[in-house]
Image (cartoon, rainbow, N blue to C red):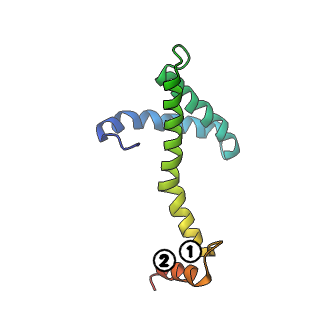
Amino acid sequence: MPYIPQEERKQLDPLIQQLVEQIVSMTGKDLSTADGRLNYTICKLLIGVLDLEKNPKYHKFNTAAGVLECVKTELYRILAAPYEEEKIAENGHILAPKWITDAMRAAKEGN
């Protein structure tokens, strides 16, 4: 869970922001090149923090996989799911009957 204490965030956020700015400056507007740089950066963080290169252990790889899975799940929960709900209300659900989609749209519009 990414909800670490505020004091720890204050220590990490400036460093993370520098990394974000560096990656963005390398990719420019072409976000299709960001994925490789993100993959590299995330791998290097996991390798360094978990000491995977010098001291590989199954439980460390398991920890890395678990962290990545939780990151994926949390990003989906806090960013992608609300976006999808917005698009469902806007365009209709692929499976829902029209009356459900209409109700979702009306709720979003405050009717």
The residue under the point 46% across, 36% down is: 16
Vertical order, 54 against 64 (above or below): above
Q: Residue type at mark 1?
A: Ala
- Residue at the farthest top position: 54
Cα–Cα gap, marks 1 and 2: 7 Å
Which picture quadrant has residue 34? top right
Q: Residues within 10 Å of mark 1 (few under 14, many from 20)?
A: many
Q: Which residue type carries mark 2?
A: Lys
Residue under label 2, please give it: 108
Which residue is painted at 65% across and 40% down in the image? 35
Q: Which residue is mark 1?
A: 89
Q: Secondary structure at mark 2?
A: helix
Q: Is residue 29 above or below residue 98?
A: above
Residue sitting at x 47%, y 80%: 107
Where residue 13 appears, as percent x and y from the top left, is 41, 38
Dots 1 and 2: beta carbons under 8 Å? yes
Q: Where 51 falls versus 33 (above or below)? A: above
**In this rendering, would 5 be left or right of 23?**
left
Q: Quadrant of residue 14?
A: top left
Q: Residues within 10 Å of mark 2 (few under 14, many from 20)?
A: few
59 or 12, which lies in front? 59
**Is residue 69 visible to us here?**
yes
Viewer-closest of 10 and 36? 36
Q: In the picture, which quadrant includes the N terminus?
A: top left
Q: Earlier in the sequence, mark 1 or mark 2?
A: 1
> Residue 7 in the image: x percent, y percent?
29, 37
